[in-house]
Image (tube, helix red, strand yellow):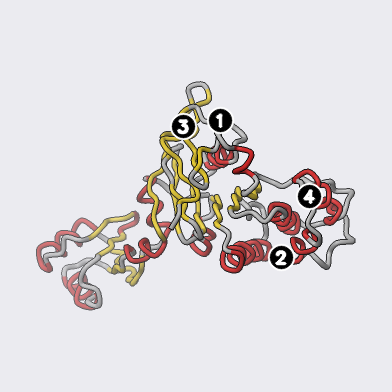
Amino acid sequence: MSEIIKTRNLMKIYGEQKSVDHLNITVNQGEIYGFLGRNGAGKTTTIRMLLGLIKPTFGQVEIFGENLFNNQKSILRRIGSIVEVPGFYENLTARENLLINAKILGVHKKNTIEEALEIVDLHNETKKLVGKYSLGMKQRLGIARALLHNPELLILDEPTNGLDPIGIKEIRSLILSLAKDRNITIFVSSHILSEIEQLATHMGIIHEGRLLEEIAFDKLRERNRNYLEFQVSDDNKAIMLLESQFGISDYEVHAEGNIRVYSHLGKQGRLNKAFVENGIEVLKINISEEGLEDYFTKLVGGGAIG
């Protein structure tokens, strides 16, 4: 499997602020790579460097196996992108906007615009002025523009940001179909955990400019662990009981008296009985599985992305 994007110790420094700090990411052909991080983590700065819009302070960007800044013009012809909110002439129709962009890109193939509009399901909205489009329609039109020159790689910066649930679902379905049906490699940034979880095949987590981890979602799901969760009146006493009576050492203590036990699955009845017999009130019992939010919180050492 060939590497489509590879960065080597990529850095961008503004004054004393390291916006991106020694970033090493690898995106392989055919992947939907979710670039996940809080707002301000360095996602957009990274994307701007991947597209040659800004130059790194240090490090390298390789796309399609070539140094981006040595071969920028030929490489960018193979990439489609949306950076932040796509801009259009709102007093023109979608077709008129795409015609202007096609001329700029040097795309003259017949039916290109109609095909792009059909892919994003805007082919029945061509008489409406773009100024009357919803935000979700504008995002889909932005993807149509990015597809005009039949790119091999799509780079999308927060494509569902600000959309309602229906718009989010439409963009998600569109991205999945582009990867599956057109074999386009997709690099998509987001601060929304659930979106990346439903969309991406691989993920990189960035925090304060640094890559914390890069992992395939299949591997992440294998790593997810089931656990018993007890909310008790006295977590210190409960821990002593778990250790002394049951020999349990694989547990975690969370806020509000919540204890997660990673062993003894299916034996919650025995544990509950022991708590009660020793004067520990059990307020709640759950059988749970760690998800992406738990994983992210552990990595960044704080709350979930918001």
Pointer 3 residue: 11
Pointer 2 residue: 119
Callout 3: helix, strand or loop?
strand
From what the image shows, is residue 46 above or below residue 205?
A: above
Give residue 227's quadrant in the image.
Answer: bottom left
Measure how far apart labels 2 and 3 are at the Cα level. 36 Å
Amino acid type, label 2: Ile
Mark 2 or mark 4: name the one nearer the start of the chain: 4
Amino acid type, label 4: Ala
Q: Nearer the viewer, residue 280 or 78?
A: 78
Side of 145 where 255 appears, left or right: left
Pointer 4 residue: 102
Pointer 1 residue: 55
Side of 284 where 17 appears, left or right: right
Mark 1 or mark 2: name the one nearer the start of the chain: 1
Q: Nearer the viewer, residue 79 or 238?
A: 79
Callout 2: helix, strand or loop?
helix
Measure how far apart labels 2 and 4 are at the Cα level. 16 Å
From what the image shows, is residue 136 above or below residue 275?
A: above
Q: Tags 2 and 4 in contact by the CB under 8 Å rule?
A: no
Side of 267 where 48 appears, left or right: right
Q: Nearer the viewer, residue 51 or 17?
A: 51
Q: Residue at x 65, y 44 (%)?
A: 84
Circle 4: is it few (<14), some (14-19), or many (20+) Cα within 10 Å? some
Q: Residue 69 in the image: x percent, y percent?
A: 55, 34
